[in-house]
Image (spheres, rainbow, N blue to C red):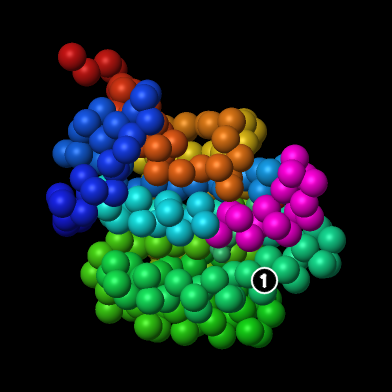
């Protein structure tokens, strides 16, 4: 992905003491960064605010994260915004989140145009409220020709149901004669996942210190490096992002092989 050097340096001016752009090898950026954004509720509660205020604050972190990814030249950014299990939250919170997704997307469309970002959605969008669905569809259509970073939003996403759906689609193709059972391999399954066309994430970041995958990208994270930070999502900023990349670049990725010298 192309990077604008002048913009990049200006964006990372005024670095804190422990991390700076110079600590990063720009030639070895992860091509796909994925994030489990966690801790909005705790961030709000710690300030005596309603949980919804944490989600609203989380939008600012997400905007900064999209911009940071573009500045660094990451090819794809995906974020877990709403899981299939999140419907169990109080109706008021679910309604607020659905409203926030729709309004944020409309508000941020100019940013996606300006930064040439292509939108993608992971998850079952059919059961979303109509307004949210319509705005998502508009975002998809309006950014389809963009050639810069892909920004994938996981909404009503669950990895087990994604894999089950892929298996069902394959079974149907076999049943109807478009595919034979012996042709079914990893690439056939991958092509039926919501993430079809995206490279697997090279780096997964989870905020708020939780050490769980929470039914997120179980197939795609097979060889991904994990970075867990105690920061709550509304406190996640470009510097914490750089710390994650620095940690990633310090790892020795073996993909099941032996240590490279
Ligand atoms: C997890 O925090 C966060 C979410 C379930 C929602 C993520 C939503 C946003 C960051 C808002 C902006 C997103 C878009 C796409 C506009 P939590 O509520 O689980 O926090 P807790 O673990 O402290 O309760």
Compared with 218, 23 (above or below) is above
Quarter of image, res 14? top left
- In percent of the image, x 74 and y 44: which residue is there? 47
Whole-percent x, y for residue 25 in the image = 20, 33
Q: Is mark 1 within 8 Å of ligand 1?
A: no
For residue 189, say whether it is visible. no
Compared with 132, 68 (above or below) is above
- In percent of the image, x 24 and y 69: which residue is there? 147
Q: In which quarter of the image is the N terminus?
A: bottom left
> Is residue 207 found left or right of 199 in the rendered image?
right
Compared with 15, 144 (above or below) is below
Q: How many marks?
A: 1
SS state under label 1? helix
Q: Does the magenta stretch include residue 40?
A: no
For residue 210, say whether it is visible. yes
Mark 1 sits on what residue? 98
In the image as oriented, which residue stretches furthest toward the front?
14
- In percent of the image, x 49 and y 67: which residue is there? 121
Whole-percent x, y for residue 230 in the image = 59, 31
Quarter of image, res 171? bottom right
> Is residue 202 found left or right of 261 in the rendered image?
right
Structural crowding at the residue carrying mark 1, measured as other residues with C-alpha within 10 Å and reported as few (<14), some (14–19) or many (≥20): some
Whole-percent x, y for residue 54 in the image = 68, 53
- In percent of the image, x 43 and y 54: which residue is there? 64
Principal SS element in the magenta part?
A: helix
Q: In which quarter of the image is the C terminus?
A: top left
Whole-percent x, y for residue 15 in the image = 33, 34
Q: Does the magenta stretch include residue 46?
A: yes
> Is residue 96 found left or right of 75 in the rendered image?
right
Of residues 39 and 201, the one nearer the viewer is 39
Of residues 233 and 135, the one nearer the viewer is 233
Q: Give the range drawn in magenta.
A: 44-59
């Amino acid at each position: 992905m192309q990077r604008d050097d002048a913009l990049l340096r200006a964006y990372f001016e005024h670095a804190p003491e422990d991390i700076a752009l110079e600590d990063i090898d720009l030639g070895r950026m992860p091509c796909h960064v994925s994030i489990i954004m966690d801790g909005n509720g705790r961030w709000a509660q710690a300030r005596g605010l309603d949980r919804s205020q944490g989600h609203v604050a989380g939008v600012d972190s997400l905007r900064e994260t999209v911009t940071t990814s573009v500045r660094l030249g990451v090819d794809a950014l995906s974020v877990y915004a709403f899981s299939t299990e999140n419907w169990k939250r109080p109706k008021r919170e679910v309604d607020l989140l659905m409203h926030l997704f729709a309004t944020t997307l409309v508000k941020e469309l100019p940013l996606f145009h300006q930064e040439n970002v292509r939108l993608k959605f992971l998850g079952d969008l059919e059961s979303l409220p109509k307004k949210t669905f319509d705005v998502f569809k508009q975002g998809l259509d309006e950014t389809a020709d963009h050639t810069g970073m892909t920004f994938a939003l996981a909404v009503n996403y669950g990895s087990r149901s994604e894999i089950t759906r892929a298996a069902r689609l394959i079974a149907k193709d076999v049943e109807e004669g478009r595919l034979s059972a012996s042709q079914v391999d990893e690439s056939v399954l991958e092509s039926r996942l919501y993430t079809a066309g995206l490279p697997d994430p090279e780096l997964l970041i989870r905020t708020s210190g939780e050490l769980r995958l929470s039914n997120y990208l179980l197939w795609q994270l097979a060889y991904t490096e994990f970075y867990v930070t105690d920061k709550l999502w509304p406190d996640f900023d470009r510097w914490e992002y750089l710390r994650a990349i620095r940690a990633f670049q310090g790892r020795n990725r073996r993909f099941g092989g032996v240590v490279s010298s």
